[in-house]
Image: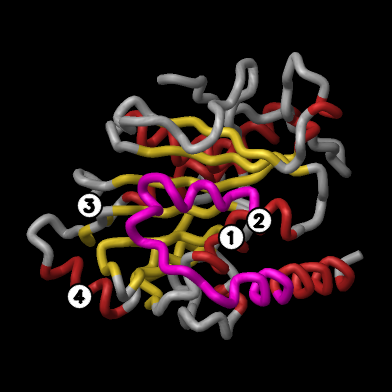
Amino acid sequence: MAAPLGCGYGDLVLASSRAVDDEEEEEEASQKPSPSAVLRWSTQAKQEISESPNDCIECSALIVAIGPVATGFIHTYLLHQETEILGMIGSGLSEDTCNTFEQTSPADATCFLHRLKSAPSVIVCQCNVDIPPEMMFSWTQQLFSCINIHNTYVGILASAPVSEFRSSVSLSDVTVPFLRGLKTNQFHGKPVCPYLEQPNTAKGLPASVLTHCQVYRVPAVLYMCYSDSIYVEIPAIKAFLPVLKGTPFRDIVQENPHADITLRKLVELRALQNNLYT
């Protein structure tokens, strides 16, 4: 690849509130099933899958937005078009948990799969919740389980704090927020921004999705926005604007004349939600 792929997690130390035998604790842990993500399709999607010769939904472009900055961008510049909900990926849900696909139950606060009605082969995944590290592999497997990706371009958008960015250049000399890109070997051409410099690596769910694409030889590109704010702000969301001119976005985007209004409302709503939990 033209730039390094990587997925790293910091050491996690859990403090126990009770004294237990180490062997007993390890035995109990080994008996617990690993948490897994749950994929549920809408009635329409189920019908399409059942009627498909390969039991998959056809997809020419899969857009995966991870985190509030990326999902805010996709909401403003892509999902203003007419869409339908194809399904959802739930984290930590049991098989009998009810969901409505209309965000009217607690189980609906999860990751939704949308399809553009103007381009039915384009699927957009909005993941605005934190996926635990132990569930990322399962989540990624579920995402790709019923999508035909043989002729698919995958675009991944995510964000990270600029404090995680390592560079020989002082950050005071860098305009923040900024974009960096990574791609799989099968993605021909270059990202619309500089490659992510070494020794930086992608982490978490974005790395899991990109690594899956690399392993299965899917053309994919990851765009990471580095921001210096812990809040969702308009400059960070707009930092993604250059991606609209690149593959796989350029052929599916329709101009949103009300983008600035949408952004203001989105940022105000996010700020209100932050205030409620602080």
Residue where numbered disc 1 is placed: 73
Residue where numbered disc 3 is placed: 148
Labels 1, 3: front one: 1
- Among numbered discs 1 and 3, the one appearing first in the sequence: 1
Instruction: Name the residue located 55 percent from the left edge and 58 percent from the top edge.
Output: 127
Contact, mark 2 vs mark 3 (Cβ under 8 Å) = no
- Among numbered discs 2 and 3, the one appearing first in the sequence: 3
Q: CA distance from mark 2 to mark 1?
A: 5 Å
Dot 3: what SS? strand
Other-residue count near label 2 (Cα within 10 Å), few / some / many at <14 / 14–19 / ≥20: many
For the rendered model, the colour scheme is secondary structure
Q: Which residues are magenta?
A: 238-265
Q: CA distance from mark 1 to mark 4?
A: 31 Å
Query: Is there any visible trace of residue 33 in the rendered image?
Result: no
Q: Is residue 208 above or below residue 127?
A: above
Contact, mark 2 vs mark 1 (Cβ under 8 Å) = yes
- Residue 92: x and y in percent read 56, 59
Query: Is there any visible trace of residue 277 in the rendered image?
Result: yes
- Among numbered discs 3 and 4, the one appearing first in the sequence: 4
Residue where numbered disc 2 is placed: 237
Look at the image and say whether residue 243 sits in the magenta stretch: yes
Q: Check residue 47 in the rendering and tell me which mark sits there, or answer none.
A: 4
Q: Quadrant of the C terminus?
A: bottom right
Residue type, mark 1 in image: Phe
Instruction: Name the residue located 75 percent from the left edge and 30 percent from the top edge.
Output: 164
Instruction: Name the residue located 27 percent from the left edge and 72 percent from the top edge.
Output: 45
Answer with left or right where residue 176 lies relative to residue 222: right
